[in-house]
Image (cartoon, rainbow, N blue to C red):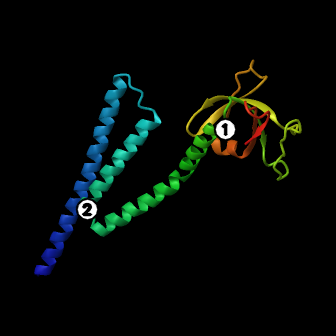
């Protein structure tokens, strides 16, 4: 009879721990929602990626903290490990895009350059001085950001057409720009 009572006590204790963990999570969500509403009323733009990222990070920390109340240490470790692996896979493209963007920002000396994709019939076009392929087009770098850049075609100034290009796509192109030291420089 004593083991049945102990089992029932263990189940009710676990149920209370789960209810407590869920209450903490809901409470944190309500606090963040209230803070968001107050910020909106005061004219703060809360629809930015930074605010959404901060919200996600806070809720992740609260969620992990609250599951430590309800689950065993082994379960918590496996959940955090799975979360880390999932975030690593999710952020792989963003990190690659950012690193290539930093590299390309350092490589582009001028805001004007000529551009040709490398995938013309699978061959890399050879560019040397006056032997430029006919596919090269002059472009101007209109705007740089962390993950992409906006290009504007030189000679097309009357239209406000800008082309958004991810840095990895830009890296896959042959870029020719005039340099102070050399007449033509291939990147």
Q: Considering only vertical position in the picture, is 182 above or below 154?
A: below
**Residue most toward the front?**
181
Q: Where is residue 15 in the image (x, y as percent from the top left)?
A: 22, 62
Q: Quadrant of the N terminus?
A: bottom left
Under circle 2, the secondary element is helix
Task: Name the N-terminal-most of marks 2 and 1.
Answer: 2
**Residue most toward the left?**
2
The residue where tag 2 is placed is: 70
In the figure, is residue 121 to the left or right of 139?
Answer: right
In the figure, is residue 159 to the left or right of 143?
Answer: right
Judge by depth and name the residue closer to the eye, 130 or 79: 130
Under circle 1, the secondary element is strand
Q: Where is residue 170 in the image (x, y as percent from the top left)?
A: 69, 41
Judge by depth and name the residue closer to the eye, 26 or 91: 91
Judge by depth and name the residue closer to the eye, 119 or 29: 119
Q: What residue is rendered at 34% in x and 47% in y? A: 59
* Quarter of the image where one finds residue 137: top right
Circle 2 residues within 10 Å: few <14, some 14–19, many ≥20:
many
Q: Which of marks 2 and 1 is in front?
A: 1
Q: What residue is rendered at 27% in x and 64% in y? A: 71
* Quarter of the image where one finds residue 112: top right
Question: What number is the disc on residue 176?
Answer: none
Question: What number is the disc on residue 165?
Answer: 1
Q: Do the residues labelled 2 and 1 touch (CB within 8 Å)?
A: no
Q: What residue is rendered at 22% in x and 60% in y? A: 17
Judge by depth and name the residue closer to the eye, 70 or 133: 133
Q: Quadrant of the C terminus?
A: top right
Q: Where is residue 51 in the image (x, y as percent from the top left)?
A: 41, 36
Q: Considering only vertical position in the picture, is 54 above or below 19?
A: above
Count of numbered labels shown in the rendering? 2
């Amino acid at each position: 009879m004593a083991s049945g009572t102990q089992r029932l006590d263990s189940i009710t204790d676990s149920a209370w721990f789960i209810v407590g963990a869920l209450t903490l999570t809901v409470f944190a969500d309500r606090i963040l929602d209230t803070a968001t509403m107050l910020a909106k009323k005061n004219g703060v733009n809360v629809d930015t990626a930074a605010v959404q990222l901060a919200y996600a990070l806070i809720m992740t920390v609260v969620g992990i903290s609250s599951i430590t109340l309800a689950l065993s240490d082994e379960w918590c470790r496996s959940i955090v490990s799975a979360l880390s692996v999932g975030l690593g896979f999710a952020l792989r493209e963003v990190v690659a895009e950012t690193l290539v963007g930093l590299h390309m920002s350092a490589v582009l000396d001028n805001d004007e350059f000529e551009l040709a994709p490398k995938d013309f019939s699978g061959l890399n076009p050879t560019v040397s001085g006056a032997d430029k392929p006919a596919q090269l087009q002059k472009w101007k770098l209109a705007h740089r950001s962390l993950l992409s850049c906006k290009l504007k075609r030189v000679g097309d100034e009357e239209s406000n057409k800008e082309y958004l290009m991810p840095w990895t796509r830009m890296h896959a192109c042959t870029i020719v720009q005039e340099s102070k030291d050399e007449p033509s420089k291939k990147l």
